[in-house]
Image: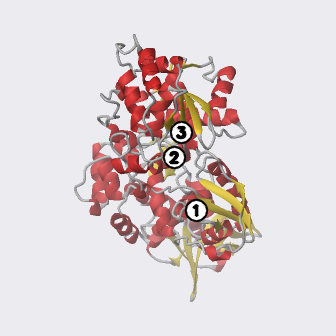
Amino acid sequence: MRLKDYLARLEEPQITQLRRNVATMGDCGEGREMAEALMSSGTLQALVDSMSQWERETWKLIVRRVGAVPFTLAALGKFAYGRFTGAQLMVSAIRLCRKGLLAQLRNKRGDTLYAMPADLFEICSGMVRTPFIPATTEIDDEVVVTRSASVDLARQLFCLLVYLRLNPLKLTRSGEVPKRVAVQIASMLDGLCEDADLRMKQLIDLGCAMQLLRREADLLEIDARRTEAWIRLSEDARNLMLYEYWMSGLTSESVANTHAMLAMQRVTVWQWFPLAQLIQSLAEDDIIEDEQTALLELVEWIKPLADCGWFDLGESGSGVVCRLRICLQWSSVEIPVGDGLNEQDRRVMPQWVVQPDFEVLVPPGVPFAALWELEMMAERRQLDSVCVYKLTKESVQRAAVVGRNSSRCLEWLRRHALYEIPENVILGINRWFSGFDDMPNADAGAKSGEGESQRVDGEESFFSFDIPNRPYLDGYEVVVKLPEEEELLREWRDVPPLWLKQSRPYHLSVRKQIVRQALEWQTAVELGQENECMTVQPLHIDERSGETCFVGRVGMKEETIILASWNRIRLLLPGVNE
């Protein structure tokens, strides 16, 4: 869940309340504008600076040890053992919700949980982490690459989209791709990994999540308009979008892996660095404790990312090393318009060669925006460093069925050809299109006059990173009403005011009553005798030898406290007298 999506669910009274709680947001709008205001570095830093010490430390604990996954206060309490009381965590969670830094959720059983919006977590992660700058000088010997993809995920998805554009697919009753068709598609996918069935499912799920594909009844179809907009993206923008969607569906349960991914995204592309360095930096920031276990988990998490073409893994004298293959920072990419190819791109991009035998030789590096039209009109015969396509009567007439005509196909071939188109190829294409040129253009997203792909109205909304709710939020209801700290304090006001004012003498029975109240509210008590004072959180009552005792936590240690030995006591409540 992203912050913008969460804020969109709040009702106007809650939005107004949130603006009032976060004064630095000013009179901003709703949705994206409000989310951007809240996530600005100035607003976030001001919010953190305004927190009480234990509220700020709770926020840091959530960022470091929980991340963007839903959590209960009991689960958070395991990380907070010895640092905060349960009451402090409860009040902190409420205050963070009222600042927009946490969303309150409810599961199907009615239990209350909390979650930090994913995009907000990414920014907060940078606030609690020391910037990771790898000391690459330690890698002074040759790296042996152990995991690397020969073809990236974008190209595999492109091949699947081409197939489905030309062949609408009928699914089985269970919604799966028929085995026979899956084998046929897998044979056409460029550089498919060993587990073809798994990658096929991943590609289809990814295409559906990005709304490039849609399931209509028992059919799997392509959204031509969105797809043609996607292929016109720059390579960096396209890969970054795929990475964002992929990570939104496969977010690791390990918050350490998530922090590691955010750190690695900012490392220089093609720069090898030891993963042990990254793990050590996370340990220094109190994000992990067991460095060896964390390293093994991170390596397993990077393997599928390497299979997709985003990372490489290797071995060197420095141990396991990694490098980023492509840029994964949104701020560094550019969304192009039109067909994604400006005149300078066209001058320097590789160009294909159309031969008299109707073969088209395509060198590496030809953009998807150019390849898409070629895929519509020609059969792919060979996948190698140089791909070979063949123009046939069947492939050209197939292009007519999906809305192309002779002038468009010839113009596209000329636009990206290194040499003139052979005369016999021009005559052949015109002959094969005979009788088809008058067909209605079925491809609404591809109408382009002389073959120039035009920008689609509203296209920018396709690439706004409005990723659907992450799968781990399925089954949770977002509580739109901001929690009131006063509702919690109302219950606490029922205790005698003297219990809260100062540490003072009480009868043993009253001391025991105060300890039981502290147990119920998961808070601490202050004990005193003569010149000695101690703060302790009661854990459970222990009656023995006729004396009233309880086991409590003092710092990180558990001690047995004899109440008769302490004649003064005070109940400590966060936000009231603590």
Residue 51 seen in render: yes
Q: Quadrant of residue 25?
A: bottom left
Instruction: Give the x, y percent position of residue 339.
Output: 37, 39
First of labels 1, 2 by sequence position = 1
CA distance separating discs 1 and 2: 18 Å
Asked which secondary structure carries label 3, the reply is strand
Q: Earlier in the sequence, mark 1 or mark 3?
A: 1
- Measured in 3D between alpha carbons, the distance from the residue under mark 1 to the one under mark 3, in whole angstroms, is 26 Å
| CB atoms of marks 3 and 2 within 8 Å | no
Tell whether 184 sits left or right of 449: right
Q: Is residue 93 left or right of residue 74?
A: left
Query: Judging from the image, what secondary structure is the residue with disc 1 in?
Result: loop
Q: State whether residue 70 is above or below residue 532.
A: above
Relative vertical location of residue 445 with respect to residue 275 in this rendering, above or below: above
Tag 1–tag 3 contact (CB < 8 Å)? no
Residue position marked by numbered label 3 in the rendering = 362
Which residue position holds label 1?
270
Crowd class of label 1 (few under 14; some 14 to 19; many from 20; radius 10 Å): some
Mark 2 sits on what residue? 365
| Residue 302 pos. (x, y %) | 65, 54
Q: Amino acid at mark 3?
A: Val
Q: CA distance from mark 3 to mark 2?
A: 9 Å
Q: Which is more toward the observer, 129 or 539?
A: 129
Q: Are marks 1 and 2 in contact (CB under 8 Å)?
A: no
Amino acid at the residue labelled 2: Gly
Left or right of residue 221, residue 30 in this image: left
